[in-house]
């Protein structure tokens, strides 16, 4: 992802003014699995291939964009701050960082959700 932070970033009740900073996130691995009918049943944004690439201190996807806007969010599986932020987001917005329990298929055996530690 590449771009320049030219507009204000509005998150709920906080506004982060445009920084003018250029953003280039490192190349990252992405995974998606589909049903035979074409519905995505699993999507994962993986770790950067080279954390020294780009301008975001090794952070990829939305975490790289936040870094460019001046928000240094810990973005690693198991991070308590990230896990709490994901769950607060589910309560305060329509967006989701992981599926609702009732939407997870029976064959999915992992109890990890979002930034939880991998089980």
Image: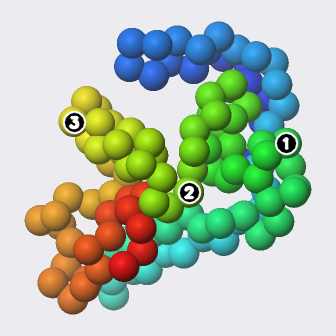
Q: Which residue is mark 2?
A: 76
Q: Which mark is residue 55?
A: 1
Q: Is residue 60 above or below residue 31?
A: above
Residues marked 2 and 1 touching at CB (< 8 Å):
no
Q: Position of residue 108 (x, y in %)?
A: 25, 83
Q: Residues within 10 Å of mark 3 (few under 14, many from 20)?
A: few
Q: Secondary structure at mark 2?
A: loop
Could you tell whether 55 is left or right of 45 in the image? Answer: right
Query: Of 18 and 37, which appears nearest the observer?
Result: 18
Could you tell whether 88 is left or right of 25 in the image? Answer: left
Q: Earlier in the sequence, mark 2 or mark 1?
A: 1
Q: Position of residue 40 (x, y in %)?
A: 37, 71
Q: Which residue is mark 3?
A: 91
Q: Quadrant of residue 76?
A: bottom right
Q: Secondary structure at mark 3?
A: helix
**Would you say residue 2 is visible in this rendering?**
no
Residue depth check, mark 3 versus mark 2: number of the one nearer the observer: 2
Could you tell whether 6 is left or right of 41 in the image? Answer: right
Q: Is residue 74 above or below residue 43?
A: above
């Amino acid at each position: 992802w590449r771009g320049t932070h030219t507009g204000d970033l509005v998150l709920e009740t906080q506004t982060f003014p445009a920084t003018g900073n250029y953003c280039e996130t490192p190349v990252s691995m992405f995974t998606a699995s589909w049903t035979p009918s074409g519905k995505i049943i699993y999507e994962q944004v993986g770790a950067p291939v080279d954390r020294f690439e780009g301008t975001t201190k090794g952070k990829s996807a939305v975490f790289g964009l936040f870094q460019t806007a001046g928000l240094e969010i810990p973005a690693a599986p198991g991070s308590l701050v990230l896990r709490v932020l994901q769950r607060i987001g589910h309560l305060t917005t329509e967006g989701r960082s992981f599926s609702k329990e009732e939407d997870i298929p029976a064959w999915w055996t992992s109890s990890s959700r979002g930034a939880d530690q991998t089980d």
